[in-house]
């Protein structure tokens, strides 16, 4: 179980003499094992919402809950993958993946079993004893995802995890994440600026508006993806050429363009 719920969530920054309303009236529910992508203009509060779920920050008003329990602090049921890899450079791939398991007190035998399974799942077995500086950027981010995945979290929070990668590596990582998400579903909240990435990966896409940040629209991707058989295609470019994909991408772009036009008006 990993359902996420935002109930009338707001965030105000400032004090009695002044400030601004960053988020207001955010209502959103992410179902158990659903992959939800969140897109929106810069400064709309996407990452702030993710931080609420992670327990790194708290809303000024409203509530954020996971499985009906109000989030007040970080917990092992939620794992976060950031844009920067944040790997320990003096530790090997295996040791980096082991960090979270040690922190939550998992016994050595179980840690070894989980690490071996995750290395295989992430196609990292041959790099288990390498250090981060010996890996490409894409490989380092794969280790970062593995470090979160090995915890078997109910909720996986991903804050623009591919934003620092070059275009080709980003595509490979998107294909890898689709493979993982379909084979071993988790509740995923995925923050991104890339519309194509959101459409390709997600079951639903939440579009945010700004000033103040709020949910403008939610686009249901999964029924179209399943009806059109997107997952039968091995390469992202084959999916991106489909009329159904192009239609969804254009719909989201138009919604985001409206927000930009209002900002510049």
Image: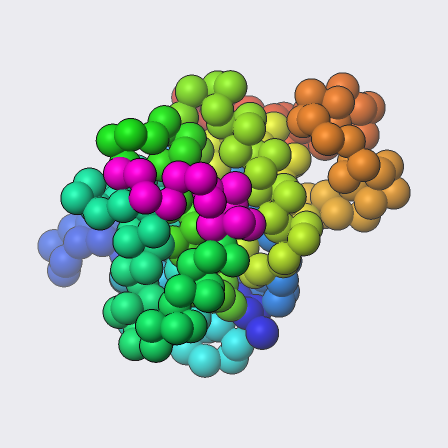
Q: Nearer the viewer, residue 164 or 51?
A: 164
Where residue 248 sits, quadrant-wise, is: top right
Q: Position of residue 51 (x, y in %)?
A: 34, 56
Magenta includes 173?
no
In the figure, is residue 242 to the left or right of 10?
Answer: right
In the figure, is residue 29 to the left or right of 138?
Answer: right
Q: Position of residue 78 (x, y in %)?
A: 42, 65
Q: Position of residue 82 (x, y in %)?
A: 35, 44
**Looking at the image, which residue is at 44% across and 39% down?**
126
Q: Position of residue 260 (x, y in %)?
A: 48, 25
Question: Residue extending furthest right?
Answer: 227
Q: Disc count in the image?
A: 0
Q: Is residue 198 above or below residue 164?
A: below
Q: Nearer the viewer, residue 259 or 198?
A: 198
Where residue 14 sits, quadrant-wise, is: bottom left
Magenta includes 129?
yes
Mark yes or no: residue 124 visible: yes
**Looking at the image, which residue is at 62% across and 50% down?**
181
**Looking at the image, which residue is at 48% across and 72% down?**
66
**Looking at the image, which residue is at 28% across and 60% down?**
99
Mark yes or no: residue 245 visible: no
Q: How is the image coloured?
A: rainbow
Q: Is residue 255 above or below residue 206?
A: above
Quadrant location of the N terminus?
bottom right
Q: Nearer the viewer, residue 230 or 212?
A: 230
Question: Residue extending furthest left?
Answer: 17
Q: Is residue 251 above or below residue 98?
A: above
Question: Which range of residues does the magenta coloring cover?
Answer: 119-131
């Amino acid at each position: 179980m990993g359902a996420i719920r935002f109930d009338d969530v707001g965030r105000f920054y400032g004090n009695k003499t002044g400030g601004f309303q960053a988020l207001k009236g955010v209502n959103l529910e992410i179902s158990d094992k659903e992959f939800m992508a969140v897109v929106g203009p810069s400064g709309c509060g996407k990452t702030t919402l993710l931080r609420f779920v992670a327990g790194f920050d708290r809303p000024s008003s409203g509530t954020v809950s996971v499985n009906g329990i109000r989030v007040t602090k970080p917990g092992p049921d939620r794992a976060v993958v950031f844009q920067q890899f944040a790997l320990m450079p003096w530790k090997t791939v295996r040791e980096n993946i082991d960090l979270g398991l040690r922190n939550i007190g998992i016994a050595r035998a179980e840690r070894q079993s989980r690490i071996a399974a995750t290395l295989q799942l992430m196609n990292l077995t041959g790099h288990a004893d390498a250090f981060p500086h010996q890996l490409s950027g894409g490989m380092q981010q794969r280790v970062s995802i593995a470090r979160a995945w090995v915890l078997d979290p109910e909720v996986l929070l991903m804050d623009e995890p591919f934003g620092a990668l070059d275009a080709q590596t980003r595509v490979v990582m998107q294909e890898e994440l689709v493979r993982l998400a379909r084979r071993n579903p988790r509740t995923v909240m995925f923050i991104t600026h890339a519309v194509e990435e959101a459409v390709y990966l997600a079951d639903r896409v939440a579009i945010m508006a700004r000033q103040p940040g709020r949910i403008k629209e939610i686009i249901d991707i999964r029924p179209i993806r399943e009806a059109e058989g997107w997952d039968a295609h091995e390469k992202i470019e084959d999916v991106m050429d489909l009329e159904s994909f192009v239609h969804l991408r254009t719909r989201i772009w138009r919604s985001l363009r409206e927000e930009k036009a209002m900002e510049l008006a």
